[in-house]
Amino acid sequence: MAVSSPHDQPTLQEILDKYSQEEGALIPVLQEVQATYGYLSKEAMRAIGKALHLSPAQVYSVATFYAQFHTRPSGKHIIRVCRGTACHVRGSDQILAVLEKRLGLQAGGTTPDLQFTLETVACIGACGLAPTMVISEETYGHMTIDKVQRLLKDLGVQAEE
Amino acid sequence: MSRLASVNELRYYPDIPFYDKQLRVVLRNCGHINPENLEEYIAMDGYAALGHVLTEMTPEQVIDEIKRSGLRGRGGAGFSTGRKWETSRRASGYPKFIIANGDEGDPGAFMDRSVMEGDPHAVLEGLAIAAYAVGSDQGYIYVRAEYPLAVERLQLAIEQARELGLLGTNILGSKFSFDIKIKRGAGAFVCGESTALMASIEGKRGMPRSRPPQSAEKGLFGKPTVLNNVETLANVPQIILKGADWFRSMGTPDSPGTKVFALTGKVRNTGLVEVPMGITLRELVFDIGGGIIGDKQFKAAQTGGPSGGCVFTGHLGLKMDFDSLAEVGSMMGSGGLVIMDEDTCMVDVARFFSAFNEDESCGKCSTCRIGTQRLHEILERICAGKGEPSDLETLEILGHLMQKATLCGLGETAPNPVLSTMRYFRDEYEAHILEKRCPAKVCKALIHYRVVAANCTGCMVCARRCPARAITGEKRAVHEIHQELCIKCGACHEACKFQAIAIE
């Protein structure tokens, strides 16, 4: 197995051993592998399939069905813009437009230096704080374009001249 | 001000309109007890209902009581919970599974998150009572990927309950054994559909299957399975403790009890509100919600998420219950209630939901896979000012077809946002198509931002804020917006203190 794990994290084999007796283990295994390695590599998906007696195609079909899974490395900071209804009517598409412009990305993309991934999320369930966005697990509510620009500044994104 | 004076000015719940009209049954403990402390739940009569059913009621009596209460599923369709349990009880096969559906996928709804995070033991107790009634010894709680805190709190609650013998073998010394596993979703709206949810627990793509066989006979892992929504289950211990008659004393004869609405959008007071079923939309928006932000005009309320529809000003007197909402072409759904004002474009709202449904369609049946794509394409075109008069008829024909010929609830209800907005806001569609105009000034292709020379002080704030560097101008001179660079994000409009940016 050529996949090495970051320091102090369970190895792929440890994760697979933990779920070997469980029915319907594929999704929890994918979740834990992604939590450890940041994304689901081809090698990891092959190894998971072998351990769970599934073909690589079956593993891949599940990994690509659910929005949570990534099959490519994502950025250090994952910025998620909530595109729920309450956020939409309070202007979340404008928040997204600013982020796309400033990061030079389309939603779903990652900057070449692997610093930022920009995503949309269907709803984070914090609709009372609309519009909202999440930066690496931290939720920000009542967003304005000005607040977005200040957050980007804090993250070291320079305004283009 | 002295300390004493400020105490005298303390306001109590009945003094605050937002709380005064609420009646909290499901949310009664949320925010009042520490959700990570089992003793606090027990001090609020927690697990008393479970103790009561295990020692003094037969499963049939539990089912009868729930049937008599008239409790209807809070997840969307509003099916009788008691009847569902009765069917499951009768189903033969072992093991039997019971699942709490916490895959709250409707954008704009977050009541299940609140209950799972704020009162997790109420979910466990409701699930255990349901398991006793239907004869199941293994339960699952399926929680959305987006709710990590709910998973954490439920996991802790399960461990605490096991330690006290409230879950596990021979619960409270009875013959009843039951345990619960948590399953985390992975981000797919369609998994709220029961057969898709079960496929997801089995580790497969969350795609619905055709029925029959019903899940009550052949569900999870091919075994008889019953699925209840989190909010439904949180009602159950209260009904057992206080009785079906108490439950029926709230709400309407056909929709007894309370409903939690997620009141959001352009309303002053946003948040979860629990009210008796049958309260009017007007009371929700204006009494509890405090009216529209900035005293703008109320235009519409969107209920039921991407499966629901929009109701308009003429419906302010509408009773908010399962049947009244269905009658006007919308639905209760999980209780999302997004309020829209004069600045919301209804065609854009329909486009927004059609994009959502296209993304979330699992692709299994072609009517939904292709239908959601075509709906979205047509609406994109209308919003871009390229609509044709025949589009309206096409949308209607396609919408009605999808309602009849799709496999599951997602496809069947996907046209609802389009059809209901066309029904009540046809003039807005016509303005987009015939006049190439967006009356609410939302659709980007039909608007542009312009500097109002008379108001512009040349303060340069807008130019600095513009993320696209599309605004130029010298200090104390009128600025200019370069339309070819403008991304129409509205940053200048938000930043200008002098009303010098107009949207046209």
Image (spheres, rainbow, N blue to C red):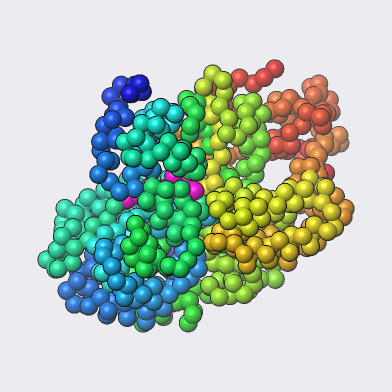
Q: Residue at x 25, y 52 (%)?
A: B158
Q: Residue at x 28, y 76 (%)?
A: B62
x, y percentage for residue B414? Answer: 61, 59
Q: Nearer the viewer, residue B453 or A17?
A: A17
In the image, residue B253 sits, relative to residue B300, either above or below, namely: below
In the image, residue B303 sits, relative to residue B90, either above or below, namely: above
Determine if the magenta segment contains residue B385. no
Q: Is residue B429 left or right of residue A21?
A: right
Q: In this rendering, does residue B464 appear at all?
A: yes
x, y percentage for residue A17? Answer: 25, 36
x, y percentage for residue B216? Answer: 37, 68
x, y percentage for residue A140? Answer: 51, 38
Range of residues picked out in magenta = B182-188
In the image, residue A143 sits, relative to residue B416, either above or below, namely: above
Q: Nearer the viewer, residue B210 or B490?
A: B210
Splitting the image into 4 quarters, where does residue B32 fall? bottom left
In the image, residue A78 sits, relative to residue B388, either above or below, namely: above
Q: In this rendering, does residue B9 appear at all?
A: no
Determine if the magenta segment contains residue B183. yes
Q: Quadrant of the C terminus of chain B?
A: top right
Q: Is residue B458 left or right of residue B224?
A: right
Splitting the image into 4 quarters, where does residue B164 fall? bottom left
Q: Residue at x 73, y 66 (%)?
A: B423
Q: Is residue B299 left or right of residue A8?
A: right
Q: Residue at x 44, y 28 (%)?
A: A41
